[in-house]
Amino acid sequence: MTDTNRSKLDAAVKLAQQVAKAHDAELREKTFEIVLKFLLSGEQANQPEAIQSPKPRQNPRGRASEGMQLNEFLAQFGAKSHTDRVTAIAYYVFKERNEPITIAEIVDVYSRARLKKPRNVSDVLGSCVRRGFFVDSDRKDGAKAWVITGIGEEFIEEYMKA
C-alpha cells in the first residue's frame, strides 16, 4: 500500500469514526461500516457538505452525547429542583459508567459543577426513591449506593424531549 493510499484510508477511517460517534451506541458500529464503505467507494465527491465536514453533534435539551462532561449535561438539562438534578446525575452516571451512585459522588458533582448543594442530600435521595426514580443498590466503596430505575430513566428522557 502506498503512502498516499494509506493516508486516504486513514482519513476515511477518521471521518467515519467522527460521523459514527454522533449516533447512539446501538447504531455506532453499523454507521461506521456504512460511512467507511461509502467513503472508500469514491462517491464522497458528490456527498453533502455535512458528511464531508462533520460538525459536532447538536444535542437536544439535556441529551448526553459521547464525550460530554457531566457539568455540560446538567447545564443543558436545566433542572430547577434538587430531586430532578440528582436524578439527572444518576442517569448520566448510569449511562456513562453503568454504576450506582453514592452521596459523596453527588456532593462532588455539585461542587465540580459549581451548583448550590442541597441542605440534606439524604432527604433528596429519599424523595427520588419515593418517586420511584431510584432503588437501593449494593454498597459501593463501603458507602450506601443507589441506582436509577426504568421510571427514573423515562423521566429524564421525557424531560429531554420537551
Image (cartoon, rainbow, N blue to C red):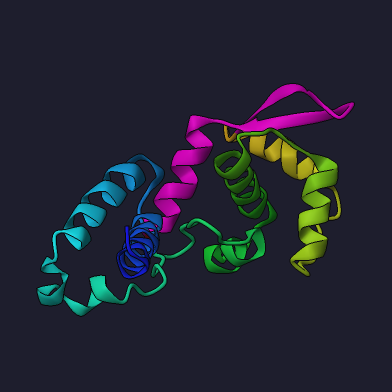
Whole-percent x, y for residue 30 in the image: 27, 43
Is 153 left, or right, of 13 in this rendering?
A: right
Image x and y of residue 18, in percent: 39, 62
The total number of labels drawn is: 0
Is 152 magenta? The answer is yes
How far across and how far down the image is residue 137, in percent?
A: 71, 23
Could you tell me which quadrant the N terminus lies in? bottom left
The quarter in which the C terminus is drawn is: bottom left
Q: Which residue is situated farthest in the top direction here?
A: 138
Taking depth in this image into account, of 76 and 8 the one nearest to the observer is 8
Magenta stretch, residue numbers: 134-161
Give the quadrant of residue 93. Answer: top right
Q: Is residue 140 magenta?
A: yes
Q: Residue at x 55, y 30 (%)?
A: 149
| Outermost residue toward the right in this view | 142
Residue at the front extreme?
Answer: 2
Q: Does residue 85 appear left or right of residue 58 in this picture?
A: right
Q: Is residue 4 above or below residue 149?
A: below
Q: How far from the left and from the top, in percent, is residue 9?
A: 32, 61
Q: Residue at x 46, y 58 (%)?
A: 63
Q: Tell me where residue 97 sits by quadrant.
A: top right
Above or below: residue 88 compared with residue 7: above
Relative to 62, 13 lies left or right: left
Q: Which residue is rendered at x = 60% and y = 67% of the image?
A: 72
Kindly identify the residue that appears in the image at 85 percent across and 44 percent down: 104
Query: In the visual, does 150 lie left or right of 5?
Result: right
User: Observer-nearest residue: 127 or 106?
Assistant: 106
